[in-house]
């Protein structure tokens, strides 16, 4: 086996093949999200093909790579060519259930963000396309990075104006998702200063579904409405459990509003960082604002269920 091929040995596993196709689907959709494809985006797609070229003789790359390369050959990816690539990728994915729908969709989302950022810019149209996808795939609520992107987009688009700082804030967060080792033009060091200036340690979920029975809660920050002890007693009354620290067993981290109004969407602090790292590692910890917590408490006490 050649050195180049050994670098891609992991992709010979069915699950890794499936992940690569999901990522490609997202990449192509992201590149086409603003209906304009420039040379950098074409080069990123070609680069993806080159990274996977050692697997040209393996299904499904034997079918997919020639189609992608042909579409890129003239420097223009037409709408029909994009649809052909997506159809081919979907045809493979639909017949190969190595991942569940949620995991496959998150892989697609990662590729989508990569494709949107392929030219290094973030347009209003690309933001709008991403928002539409997020709205259509709300079943991903509670997973990383769906909640974070959803919350950021909500706050950015609330006034229907996208400022310079808001655009940079989105790009700073997207840098946490992009696999820079697979990119031709996007370099992690170029985003370092951006991430320092627009640091986002955590994002509260938008309208999260909160249940209490057998669920484990942790609290951070201060609340105007009740002490932490009182909030813990409420959770226990509704069948939940309380823990002082964040762990993989934590279901909800509730962020208090007192003293920092921006915590409605941007959340900061040690427990937030711990929860975010666990979310990145695959734990389904949901970071919720206390307003949503109290709404869920009131509904539970009133016997209201969705």
Image (cartoon, rainbow, N blue to C red):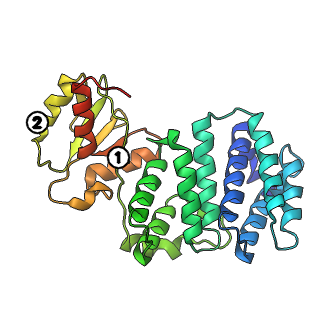
Foreground pick, 204 / 59: 204
Q: Which mark is on residue 17?
A: none
Decide: few, some or many residues near mark 2? Use Cα within 10 Å; few <14, some 14-19, many ≥20.
few
Q: Earlier in the sequence, mark 2 or mark 1?
A: 2
Foreground pick, 165 / 275: 165
In the image, residue 290 above or below residue 266: above
Q: Is residue 128 left or right of residue 98?
A: left
* Residue bearing mark 1: 275
Q: Position of residue 74 (x, y in %)?
A: 87, 73
Which residue occupies 66% across, 66% down?
Answer: 183
Q: Position of residue 170 (x, y in %)?
A: 46, 66
* Residue bearing mark 2: 229
Name which quarter of the figure residue 156 lies in.
Answer: bottom left
Q: Are marks 2 and 1 in contact (CB under 8 Å)?
A: no
Foreground pick, 116 / 78: 78
Which residue occupies 58% across, 52% down?
Answer: 133
Q: Position of residue 136 (x, y in %)?
A: 56, 46
Name which quarter of the figure residue 234 lies in.
Answer: top left
Which residue occupies 53% across, 56% down?
Answer: 131
Looking at the rendered image, the disc whose residue lies closer to the viewer, 2 or 1, is 2
Which residue occupies 11% across, 44% down?
Answer: 225
Q: Is residue 247 left or right of residue 123?
A: left
User: In this rendering, does residue 274 appear at all?
Assistant: yes
């Amino acid at each position: 086996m050649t050195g180049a091929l050994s670098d891609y040995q992991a992709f010979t596993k069915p699950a890794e093949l499936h992940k690569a196709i999901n990522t490609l689907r997202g990449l192509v959709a992201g590149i086409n999200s603003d209906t304009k494809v420039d040379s950098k985006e074409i080069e990123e797609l070609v680069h993806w093909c080159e990274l996977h070229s050692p697997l040209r003789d393996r299904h499904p790359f034997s079918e997919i790579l020639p189609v992608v390369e042909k579409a890129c050959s003239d420097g223009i990816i037409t709408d029909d060519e994009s649809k052909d690539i997506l159809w081919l990728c979907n045809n493979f994915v639909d017949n190969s259930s190595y991942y569940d729908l949620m995991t496959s969709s998150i892989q697609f989302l990662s590729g989508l963000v990569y494709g949107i950022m392929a030219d290094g810019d973030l347009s209003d149209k690309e933001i709008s396309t991403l928002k539409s996808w997020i709205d259509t795939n709300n079943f991903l609520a509670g997973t990383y990075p769906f909640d974070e992107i959803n919350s950021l987009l909500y706050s950015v688009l609330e006034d229907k104006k996208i400022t310079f700082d808001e655009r940079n804030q989105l790009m700073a967060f997207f840098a946490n998702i992009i696999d820079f080792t697979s990119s031709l033009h996007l370099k992690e060091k170029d985003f370092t200063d951006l991430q320092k200036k627009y640091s986002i340690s955590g994002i509260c979920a938008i309208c999260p579904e909160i249940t209490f029975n057998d669920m484990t809660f942790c609290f951070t920050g201060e609340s105007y409405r009740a002490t932490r002890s009182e909030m813990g007693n409420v959770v226990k009354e509704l069948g939940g459990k309380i823990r002082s620290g964040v762990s993989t067993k934590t279901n909800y981290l509730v962020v208090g509003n007192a003293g920092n109004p921006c915590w409605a969407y941007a959340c900061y602090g040690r427990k937030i960082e711990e929860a975010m790292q666990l979310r990145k590692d695959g734990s389904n910890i949901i970071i919720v604002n206390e307003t949503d917590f109290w709404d869920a408490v009131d509904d539970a006490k009133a016997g209201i269920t969705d």
